[in-house]
Amino acid sequence: MSIEKRQMKLGAFFMIPGHHVASWRHPESATEEILQFDLYKRLAKIAENGKFDMIFFADGYAVNDDIDSAIEHTVTVRPDPLTLLSAISAVTTKIGLTATVSTTYNEPYHVARKFASLDHISGGRAAWNVVTSSKNAEARNFNQDEHLQHESRYERAEEFVNVVRALWDSWEDEALLIDKKAGRFADPDKVHEINHKGNWFSVKGPLNVSRPIQGHPVVIQAGSSEAGKELAAKTAEVIFTAWQTLEEAQRFYKEVKGRLAKYGRSSEDLKIMPGVFPIIGRTEEEADEKEQLLRELIPEKAGVGLLSVLISYDLSGYPVDGPLPNLPNVNEINGGKSRFQLVKDLADREQLTIRELYQRIAGARGHREIKGTPVQIADQLQEWFENHAADGFNIMPPYLPGGLEDFVELVIPELQKRGLFRTEYTGNTLRDHLGLRRPHSKQVEQTLKKLS
Amino acid sequence: MSIEKRQMKLGAFFMIPGHHVASWRHPESATEEILQFDLYKRLAKIAENGKFDMIFFADGYAVNDDIDSAIEHTVTVRPDPLTLLSAISAVTTKIGLTATVSTTYNEPYHVARKFASLDHISGGRAAWNVVTSSKNAEARNFNQDEHLQHESRYERAEEFVNVVRALWDSWEDEALLIDKKAGRFADPDKVHEINHKGNWFSVKGPLNVSRPIQGHPVVIQAGSSEAGKELAAKTAEVIFTAWQTLEEAQRFYKEVKGRLAKYGRSSEDLKIMPGVFPIIGRTEEEADEKEQLLRELIPEKAGVGLLSVLISYDLSGYPVDGPLPNLPNVNEINGGKSRFQLVKDLADREQLTIRELYQRIAGARGHREIKGTPVQIADQLQEWFENHAADGFNIMPPYLPGGLEDFVELVIPELQKRGLFRTEYTGNTLRDHLGLRRPHSKQVEQTLKKLS
């Protein structure tokens, strides 16, 4: 902990045109521009103006087929995040640029090179959100019938990340000479093959891009499973998580930070940033009205479909303004058991209809919803930040650009007033913003020792 | 042929910092900026200012290991072209954006999506230069010991391109509705799975990006082998070739254009654009001096290495200012026989030393070198253009940005004066510039019929 007051880290998480499933119908959302660069440029500039640490794009490699009416009622187009972020890098100067890329359907050489390239052209602002993908629909776009099993995905992911890091280190920091007079472009003694041969990949190297400005682009992970937590403790620099209550967030925070020491890492080396879904009003009434409008915009079929997916039980035959039917026992459910139980408990406790239920879950999608005036929003963030539940947050605006503008205009000044958030960028790279050390440039042999 | 005078197409081909192997040592080349976006932005703006149809990045997936001293004496770092072009799209408005991507080490879903994304965010300016890769060094970065055999590479490439095109067509042009009132985002009847199962790929689709602005980004190919020519006649819209003489360029032009009819295509549907390596001086003497300077900058080991690779024979033991040694018979050479013969004939005819020989071939690298004043350069381009040898050219400046600036400031006005090149862009998309039709939006079933 430095002498200066600890400040929170903030990411702007971009589902386009908003995190709420009905965002695209919101009168103020920029749905028509969903494939136009001007929208992305505007969003990035709003976030940079707000001094966010980074913008953050989720991703997936298929049109969602979980819900029958997905194509008709939800947003199923999504430009490639690296393409967007490269373009955004040309029109911004400070903000970090995070792209989600899966280790299950890519090759480490390409991924290492793309992030190294983005890191160079952005002046050290790239971050990689490592995911392993989990949908059969994605597998079917990549020559497979079903997605890999959980355990194999994580094994592959760990090897993948290690190979990528070794490729980033395959040019030492001092390798490039560019000595025109002497005719020496690079020092061959400082450029290394990695000669990796593992269970999943054989990669000789070196990379054909020299070492990134940040040493390594920042490595981010989600995932709260046992395998996910262990992988994060070993390799991640930011964790993106989803928690509903202070207690469970604290438990996770303590547990993951506690695993760092055995990998020779300190608490500062890993930032934990849960997602939050903010509904902001100048008054409480305005916030309530905003929420109500979004709820009413959910196409009924999409709402029922989303709820059915969440509880792994098809509700399409039941009256939408009636109660949940008698559901099977949780043990008979072939899907997320904790989500099933959460929904069932909520319905029982508050006696909600199917419509009311899907309206409740269609916004935050499992993340923490915070609602209210700017002061109330700031209070809720501060509580978690100061009570060992979070180092910062991924902000998931319900609709865009309005939801992001509200946060920047109303909440950020309140956080700044409390000394909880920067008023100016003090560095140039994403590592500077996040307070993460730049990895040493080391002989690749050392990196390779870690591959096991 | 339209009533207006036919005009040539021009691409700016970017090896960075220049096409000449010693470009990086040139006092005016921007070698220090090779990984900085400002250089790429400047180059793109110079080319757009010159009204080029497109800029064009070559690519490869390995540090060159053909030449022993490659890392020390040549440029072996190369940012990912799609990353560069996305960023460039944000700071330009008209110029086409061509990235080289190999079908041997990628997946069609990713490639379809990346080019569709670039096409959307650039307003219809994307082009894909399809290559099949041929270096073992690349194979070894992707889990293989040796690169695929020529025939397999072309089979894979053909299937790959067909799958990509089917994915681009998986959303019909009218599929996106974005009807906020009615709650209809897209028309599911106009979004199609492709259900491709072939020898190389199984891809279900649809793509998660709607149909590109150009229908399909422009598809470009190189390759002059029998398989390459046939694949180009079937699927390419631009061919990038390398010819030394008018006669061989004419023969190729006639032969490939002649193959189009059997695929239901017309001569206008395929543009043939040979590479040219221009050395431009305000006077002939200045051009000679420029050439001589570049020749002298070639590091000796790199020059001998390059020549050795070209003739598949190790020359490193021989005096560099002496003649070629007695070479084996062409039939005993395990490599490019025509290049071997070309070099041997040249050495015999002009009695050149090893140094003089490598100085001759280190610039154009097999492409046509044109040298002289702006008028002489324009004459040489015009001759090929008007004699059925080319529809345009890929200009390969010896060093950058100077070599490109010379072309734009000195040669383009001469071509414009002769009515051979546009003075303003008349359209917005790359297809507009090249005079290529936009492919119809058709039911994907029709596209799939072509997959065989």
Image: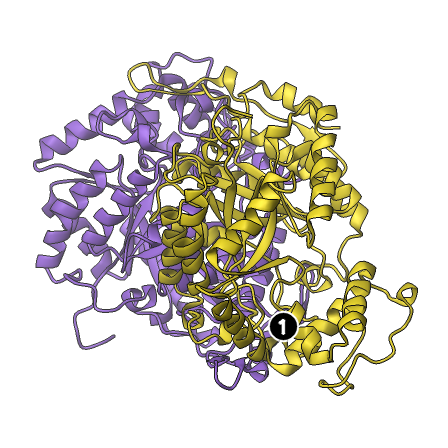
Chain colours: A yellow, B purple
What residue is at 47 percent from the left and 33 percent from the top?
A: A209
Reply above or below: B295 against A410. Answer: above
Q: Position of residue A415 (x, y in %)?
A: 46, 46
Q: What's the amino acid at mark 1?
A: Ile
Badge 1: residue crowd in 10 Å (few <14, some 14–19, many ≥20): many
Q: Position of residue B149 (x, y in %)?
A: 62, 46
Is residue A311 toward the left or the right of residue B412 in the image?
right
What residue is at 67 percent from the left and 68 percent from the top?
A: A361
Reply above or below: B427 against B201. Answer: below
Pick whichever, B73 or B320, lies toward us: B73
What residue is at 55 percent from the left and 45 percent from the top?
A: A382
Q: Which residue is mark 1?
A: B194
In this rendering, does residue B34 appear at all? Answer: yes
Pick whichever, A315 or B54, lies toward us: A315
Q: Position of residue A241 (x, y in %)?
A: 65, 48
Q: Position of residue A104 (x, y in %)?
A: 68, 49
Looking at the rendered structure, the secondary structure element under dot 1 is loop
Pick whichever, A115 or A263, lies toward us: A263
Q: Quadrant of the C terminus of chain A?
A: top right
Return the chain for callout 1: B
